Image (cartoon, rainbow, N blue to C red):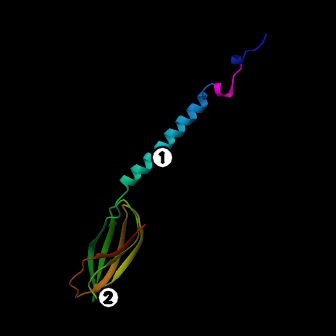
Amino acid sequence: MTKKRGDLKRKDDREGPSVAEIASVIVSVVVTISLFGYVIVMAVLAPDGPDLVVEQTSVITKGDTVEVHVLLTNKGGVGVRSAEVEIPCDDPPPSVTFENVPASGRRKAVLSCPADAEDLQPEISTWVKM
């Protein structure tokens, strides 16, 4: 029996891709699209920055000085590497630096001012985002 020219399979006449190849391509495409989607969502929903609030919690007079208790609250979604709080009651103003205040974190401190000081309200002078 002789084989005719049309009976021989050429390389161009192979069957299509296997099921494993198709599944691998589909999984790769889904993973890639998911990763890009995640990056886009995180870029859009990224927190704006820290929302720092400082308040005076108590004032205690001790002789010729006043102890001012302060509370720093970070209400934002991003931590703060450092935040400096000062009270403009003296020259130079007394200050304290809080290190590593996480998102939704709180820190307390006590600052001393002269007893005759009028302005005992703490304020944030500087801060550095993480």
Classify 10 Å Cα crowding around label 1: few (below 14), some (14-19), many (20 and above). Answer: few
Q: Residue at x 20, y 84 (%)?
A: 118
Which badge, 1 or 2, comes first in the chain's sequence? 1
From this viewpoint, is residue 63 visible? no
Looking at the image, is 30 positioned above or below residue 109? above
From this viewpoint, is residue 4 visible? yes
Which numbered disc covers residue 35?
Answer: 1
Looking at the image, is 125 positioned above or below residue 14? below
User: What are the residue bounds of the magenta stretch?
Assistant: 8-13
Looking at the image, is 68 positioned above or below residue 90? above
Q: Position of residue 92 (x, y in %)?
A: 32, 88
The kind of secondary structure element at disc 1 is helix
The image quadrant where one finds the C terminus is bottom left
Q: Is residue 89 left or right of residue 97?
A: left
- Nearest the eye: 115 or 90: 90
Residue located beneath label 2 in the image: 92
Q: Position of residue 104 (x, y in %)?
A: 36, 61
Q: CA distance from mark 1 to mark 2?
A: 52 Å
Q: Position of residue 79 (x, y in %)?
A: 40, 64
